[in-house]
Amino acid sequence: MNLMSAVVANPSAAVLSSVAALSYACLAWAHHRMTATQVRVAIGAAWLLHLLALGQGLVGDPVRFGFAPALSITAWLLLTVYLVESRLYPQLQARWPLAALGALTVVLALLFPGTDYPTLKSPWLPLHWALGIASYGLIGAAVVHAWLMQRAERAMRMGSSSETSMPLLMLERLTFRFVGAGFALLTATLVAGTLFAEAFRQAWVWDHKTVFSVLSWFTMGVLLWGRWRLGWRGRLAVRMLYLGAGLLLLGYVGSRFVIEVVLQRM
């Protein structure tokens, strides 16, 4: 779908998405020249516009969902986590990467709104979606914290760390808290998927989405076990987290991207 057809198909969503993406882009470009109050207002406005744009697709008639809306919701959840955490830990600095991610995913969701779902086959389906996207958001938050942890460690080794930067051990603790929460929700997602299949008396299907999701679940489980029993930390733990997150991304988002964009099947 090109930009013009997206505007014609849903003009209100196109306007909201465009304004939200522009707000994110302006924040990513000018955040270092803005005061703390201006940054909070800009983030809050972009966050709200993003939520309204998502609502156009998720509560519309028919409901539409696909790889791009999934990425857009994940980015919105990451920003939500950041808004809460930045109040508790003002040293946490990840404004421009999250703003850039928000702008990109909003535009993607406008161009690729996903598949129409005029009727939901089972009440388990929205629960399955919600759990899956929540696990994406929490594991995505763990990835952001791991990236910040690596950046802080690199700065400390180079002797350029600031007194206002986030403590390395605190970043590590937060990273694994998000990994644990994401693993729990991913487990619930797989269980809900099993129940969803049983509701239609279908067998568990080992398609690409299922295989990558189970591999991600296994990788996250091994990471948490290694952290608990063997004290894994540092580069090994971060690389395993990146691997698990990449496998999860290939699960739903990757498979739907191939179907919707490469094969152009809806």
Image (cartoon, grey):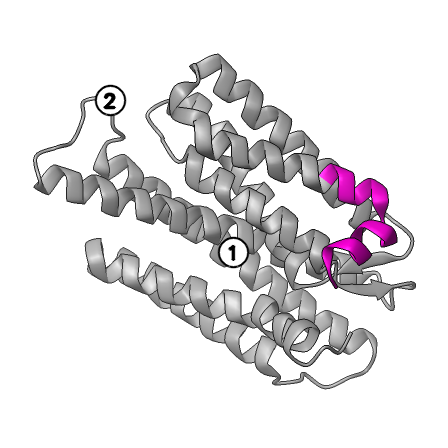
Where residue 257 sits in the image (x, y, percent)? 62, 70
In the rendered image of this protein, does residue 18 appear above or below residue 163? below
Q: Main secondary structure of the magenta part?
A: helix
Whether residue 144 can be seen here: yes
Say what amino acid the circle numbered 1 marks.
Ala
Q: Is residue 85 magenta?
A: no
Distance from label 2 to label 1 (Cα)?
Answer: 33 Å
Q: Is residue 25 above or below residue 233?
A: above
Provide the residue designation for mark 1: 184
Q: Residue at left 68%, top 54%?
A: 109
Task: Quarter of the image for the C terminus: give it.
Answer: bottom right
In depth, the one of 42 and 170 nearer the eye is 42
Q: Is residue 4 magenta?
A: yes
Q: Which residues are magenta?
A: 1-16
| Residue under the point 77% across and 57% down | 126
Left/right of residue 32 with respect to residue 203 in the rendered view: left
Q: Amino acid at mark 2?
A: Thr
Residue under the point 57% across and 19% down: 41
Left or right of 191 on screen, residue 242: left
Q: Which mark is residue 244?
A: none
Quadrant for residue 4, please give it. bottom right
Residue wearing tag 2: 164
